[in-house]
Amino acid sequence: MTRRFAAIGEGPLVLVLHGPNLGALGRRDPGLYGALDLDQIMERLAKLAGELGLRVEGLQSDREGELVEALLAAGGRGVAAAVLNPGALAHTSYAVRDAVEAAGIPVVEVHLSNVHARERWRHHLAIAPAAAGVVAGFGPASYDLGLRAAADLLARRT
Ligand code: DQA
């Protein structure tokens, strides 16, 4: 499955990428991931983007290659920064890590859950060394904090 969320707001464009299984948010283990679905998370982010003077656009894909393509295309079409929840690809995907490196824009990795407090295999973060930083464990607020971090990075660059 792929879902796209059209750009909203004005200012530098931040791409919010959601990886595999995140389309099921809201009904997928709400005790762990929270009760908000992806539409509600994107609505919150659009509101916050307005406060921060940013434009946000979203993509959720269950396919690794689609996330790689979105990252590689980002810089060339004017995306200033990205917020990325890679889902389980966070623990395995060197292809997404290479794409984050190649993207040439700051990428903030976010996780709803505190992956370090969960199973051992979730402690390894394959993409994180290429990210500007990682936010994990705050439920839907992890995305908000990720967007604030992206705004901060962009403000420091200009
Ligand atoms: C997740 C954590 C991953 O370990 C998991 O596979 C997910 C969601 C999070 O947001 O907490 O799909 O990225």
Image (tube, rainbow, N blue to C red):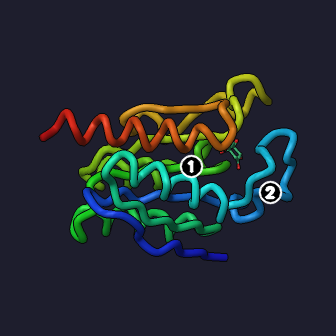
Separation of disc 2 and disc 1 at Cα?
15 Å
**Which residue: 64% across, 50% down?**
87
- Label 1 CB sits under 8 Å from any ligand 1 atom: yes
Residue 139 image position (x, y, % from top left): 69, 38
Instruction: Quickly name the residue at label 2.
Output: 26
Residue 54 image position (x, y, % from top left): 33, 54
**For the residue carrying disc 2, how many other residues have a C-alpha within 10 Å: few (<14), some (14-19), or many (20+)?**
some
Q: Is 80 above or below relative to 64? A: above
**Would residue 130 appear left or right of 122 to someone viewing this image?**
left
**Would residue 107 appear left or right of 60 to someone viewing this image?**
left
Residue 7 image position (x, y, % from top left): 41, 70
Q: Which mark is residue 85?
A: 1
Q: Amino acid at mark 2?
A: Gly
The C terminus is located in which quarter?
top left
Q: Is 112 above or below relative to 11? A: above
Q: Quadrant of residue 22?
A: bottom right
Q: Is 132 above or below relative to 79? A: above
**Taking the image as four quarters, which one is ligand 1 found in?**
top right
The N terminus is located in which quarter?
bottom right
